C-alpha cells in the first residue's frame, strides 16, 4: 500500500471517531450536567530512508472535555444543585471517587445525600453528607453550607482534578483523574437549579455535516487510488 493510502486511512479513522463523538454530544443535549467532548488531531512526521520524502500522518486519539458553563434551569427542588463557575461535585462510586456536574441529589433511607444511582455526595472533607430524614426546612448557601432549620449540618465541597488535563470521562456525566482531586474555591452552588448540557445543538449538527462531507471526500480518494493501482497492475500484467 502506498503512502497516500496510509495517510487517507489514518484520516478516515480519525474522522470516524470524531463523528461518533459528535453524535454522542447531540444525543446528550438534554442530559443534566453533560460536558461536550471533542477530539484532538495530532500530526506525526517520519523521515524515510533514501531519497523518499518524509511521511506525515494524522492521528486522533486524544479526547478533550469542554468546560464552558451550561445554562441553569430552575426546578425548585431542595436537593437540586447547580454549580455556577468552576468546580465539580465529588461522589463516591464503586470505582472510587469521581467528579460530576449533575446535581440532582436525593437523601437515602439513612439520610445521606446521593445520586439517582445511589452514589453518595461528599463534603469538603471527603465524607458523606447526612441530612436528618425528618428535616423540613433545608437551605443550602452558595458556599455549599447545608442548614436544617437554621442550623448548619454540613458543607458540600467543590473539587477539581489536581492536573487540569487529567480529566477522564467514566460515563456521560462522571469523571475520574489519575492524580486525584483537590478542593477549590470560587464556584457558587445554587439550590433549586440544575445545570443543563453545555452542548450547542446548532454547532454540533453543523460539525456533523462537515465531518460527514470530509469522510465522503476521503472515501472517494481511496476509491480513486484503488482504481489507479488496479489499472497499473492490469497494464503491467499484459
Image (tube, grey):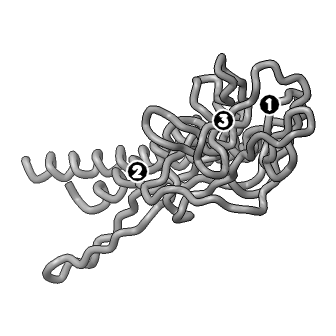
User: Which residue is depicted at the point 76% across and 20% down?
Assistant: 133
Which mark identifies residue 130? none
Q: Which residue is mark 2?
A: 221
Label 3: how many residues lie within 10 Å, few (<14), some (14-19) or many (20+)? many
Q: CA distance from mark 2 to mark 3?
A: 29 Å
Q: Is residue 179 left or right of residue 127?
A: left
Local crowd at mark 1 within 10 Å, few (<14), some, or many (≥20)?
many
From the top left corner, tell me how far across and down residue 76 is, in percent: 91, 28
Q: CA distance from mark 2 to mark 1?
A: 55 Å
Residue lying furthest left = 237
Mark 1 = which residue? 79
Give the secondary structure at mark 3: helix
Pointers 2 and 3 in contact (C-beta within 8 Å): no
Q: Judge from the rendering whether residue 23 lies leftward or rightward of residue 238; answer left or right.
A: right
Q: Position of residue 219 (x, y in %)?
A: 42, 44
Residue 199: name its quadrant: top right
Residue matched to label 3: 26
- Furthest-bottom residue in this view: 51
- Lower sequence index among marks 2 and 1: 1
Front disc: 2 or 1: 1
Amino acid at each position: 500500500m502506498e503512502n497516500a493510502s496510509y495517510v487517507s486511512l489514518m484520516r478516515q479513522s480519525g474522522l470516524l471517531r470524531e463523528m461518533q463523538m459528535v453524535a454522542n454530544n447531540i444525543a446528550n443535549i438534554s442530559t443534566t450536567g453533560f460536558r461536550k467532548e471533542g477530539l484532538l488531531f495530532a500530526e506525526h512526521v517520519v523521515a524515510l530512508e533514501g531519497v523518499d520524502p518524509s511521511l506525515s500522518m494524522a492521528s486522533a486519539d486524544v479526547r478533550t472535555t469542554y468546560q464552558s458553563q451550561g445554562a441553569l434551569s430552575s426546578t425548585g427542588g431542595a436537593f437540586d444543585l447547580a454549580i455556577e463557575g468552576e468546580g465539580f461535585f465529588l461522589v463516591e462510586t464503586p470505582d472510587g471517587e469521581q467528579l460530576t456536574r449533575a446535581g440532582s441529589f436525593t437523601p437515602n433511607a439513612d439520610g445521606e445525600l446521593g445520586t439517582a444511582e445511589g452514589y453518595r455526595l461528599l463534603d469538603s472533607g471527603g465524607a458523606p453528607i447526612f441530612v436528618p430524614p425528618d428535616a423540613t426546612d433545608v437551605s443550602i448557601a452558595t458556599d455549599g453550607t447545608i442548614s436544617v432549620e437554621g442550623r448548619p449540618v454540613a458543607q458540600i465541597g467543590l473539587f477539581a482534578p489536581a492536573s487540569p488535563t487529567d480529566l477522564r470521562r467514566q460515563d456521560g456525566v462522571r469523571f475520574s483523574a489519575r492524580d486525584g482531586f483537590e478542593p477549590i474555591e470560587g464556584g457558587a452552588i445554587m439550590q433549586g437549579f440544575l445545570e443543563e448540557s453545555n452542548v450547542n445543538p446548532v454547532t454540533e449538527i453543523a460539525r456533523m455535516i462537515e465531518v460527514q462531507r470530509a469522510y465522503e471526500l476521503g472515501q472517494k480518494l481511496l476509491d480513486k487510488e484503488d482504481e489507479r493501482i488496479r489499472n497499473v497492475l492490469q497494464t503491467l500484467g499484459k
